[in-house]
Image (cartoon, rainbow, N blue to C red):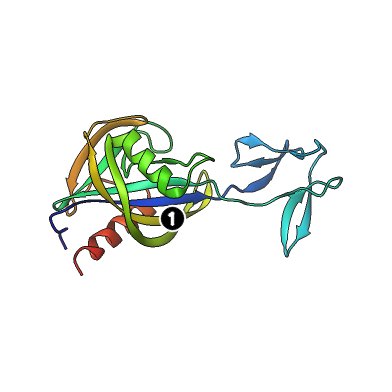
Amino acid sequence: MPLESSNSVFIAVFFPCTYLKDSYYGFEVNDKIPVRYCIKCGRNLEKKEIEGKKRYCCPDCGWVHYKNPLPSVACVVRKDDCVLLIKRGVAPDIGKWALPSGFLEDDESPVEGCIRELEEETGLHGRVKRLLDVDNEESSIYGNVLVIGYEIEIIGGELRAGSDTLEVKFFPVNNLPLIPFESHLRILKRAIETFTT
């Protein structure tokens, strides 16, 4: 179903969960960053069953490495029957089309991060209208990703490619390019359904 005529934005907040796995050097987060020592006291971490799951923890001070999420955001900008996509300038999937997206800073709320990322990558300014939905996706880099979607109203700005983007372009919802992220596709589908029911 086509989108109704409107200039609205949906924001999705991603919470990628880091994971640990055994390796030759001890164990690592995301297969890239070695994590062998306690961040509080520096002791070698050990794997133990805690709260019914195997977790890495410090045998001295008791610090536990939980699989806490690393939040990021993704935006759906709607104009008539088109949606705005960015051509990614950074990994993963450099050169592929996706929703505007990026990580949250530790001193901002999800809403603040959504608005900031939207402006940084597209040049558009917006404000939150309402919460839309919650979703998740398994990321090969970040593990499980929680997705919190917000509807955002565009209030200004000038459309342009910004940080981490090679190009920005509106695509008809019935003729989208390949989008490598399943959660982005599900959010787009929910956005379209919201405005056609």
x then y, percent, for residue 189: 28, 60
Q: Residue, x 52% and y 40% (percent of image)?
A: 107
The answer to whether residue 29 is above or below residue 130 is above
x then y, percent, for residue 167: 26, 32
Q: Amino acid at mark 1?
A: Val
What residue is pinned by disc 1? 147
User: Which of the image's four quarters has the N terminus?
Assistant: bottom left
Q: Residue, x 76% and y 60% (percent of image)?
A: 50
Mark 1, Cα crowd under 10 Å, few <14 / some 14-19 / many 20+, is many
Residue 77 visible from this viewpoint: yes
188 on left or right of 74? left
How many labels, in total? 1
x then y, percent, for residue 57: 77, 49
Q: Secondary structure at mark 1?
A: strand
141 on left or right of 98? right
Q: Residue, x 14% and y 59% (percent of image)?
A: 4
The answer to whether residue 99 is above or below residue 81 is above
User: Given the current orientation, which residue lies at the most extreme right position?
Assistant: 60
The answer to whether residue 51 is above or below residue 168 is below
171 on left or right of 129? left
Seen from the viewer's position, the closer of residues 174 and 64 is: 64
User: Given the current orientation, which residue lies at the most extreme bottom position?
Assistant: 197
User: Which of the image's four quarters has the C terminus?
Assistant: bottom left
